[in-house]
Amino acid sequence: MYAGFTHGGDKLIELQYEGRSNQDIRAGGAINLGAGLNYQFNNKWSLQSNLGYHFDSDNASNADITFSRWALDVIPYYQLNDSFKVGVGITYHLNTELEMDMNNTNSGISFKNTAGVVASLGYQFENHNGWLEARFVKISYDADKVNVGKVWGINVNQSADVHGAPSISGNHIGLAYHYVF
């Protein structure tokens, strides 16, 4: 199991609050939770596969906004010494969505499933069933559909395909703690 924090990616929305600082929703942020399996080939090589829920969200009295996706990682690792391992692999993001519920109107954008590259450096704690991971992910998202559920409280339930929209960068850095059973 793992939990981590990430930062980066394009700014999707900036929420402005009265009397406090603004909050950004980014395509590379902010919380990453999941579980994985590790297969040890020998004392130098292993293969880690993870499935995680990665999201950035904020809510206020008049708005709930979330950018979320499921991330599937497959990373081969090379053990440098007793403490450090390094890996480069692939990440595949599924069900990527930006959901907005503001002022009695809800809408969203769904994105195409996409693959990216993940580079990882792991530090194994001595005498502890856990390790710390620093990672960099290079990935971009392409909008697929715009969805509108309600407008001013009236159900419309409509969606439209998106064509020609620019890609959104989801590139990010992160730090995660993995607990090993």
Image (cartoon, grey):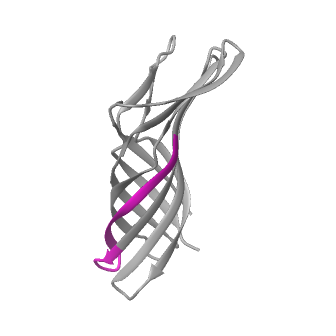
Residue 84 position within the rendered picture, expressed as x and y whole percent measured from the top left: 33, 72
* Residue 94 counted in the magenta span: yes
Residue 2 lies, with reference to residue 64, above or below; the image says below
Residue 68 placement, left or right of 105 = left
Q: Which residues are magenta?
A: 77-96
Residue 132 lies in quadrant: bottom left
* Residue under the image location 67 percent in, 16 percent down: 104
Residue 181 position within the rendered picture, expressed as x and y whole percent measured from the top left: 59, 74
Residue 68 position within the rendered picture, expressed as x and y whole percent measured from the top left: 52, 41
In the foreground, 41 or 163: 163
* Residue under the image location 32 percent in, 68 percent down: 87
* Residue under the image location 48 percent in, 59 percent down: 72
Residue 67 placement, left or right of 12 = right
Q: Which residue is at the far left?
A: 80
Residue 164 lies, with reference to residue 156, above or below; the image says below
Dominant secondary structure of the residues highlighted in magenta in the image: strand
Residue 167 placement, left or right of 144 = left
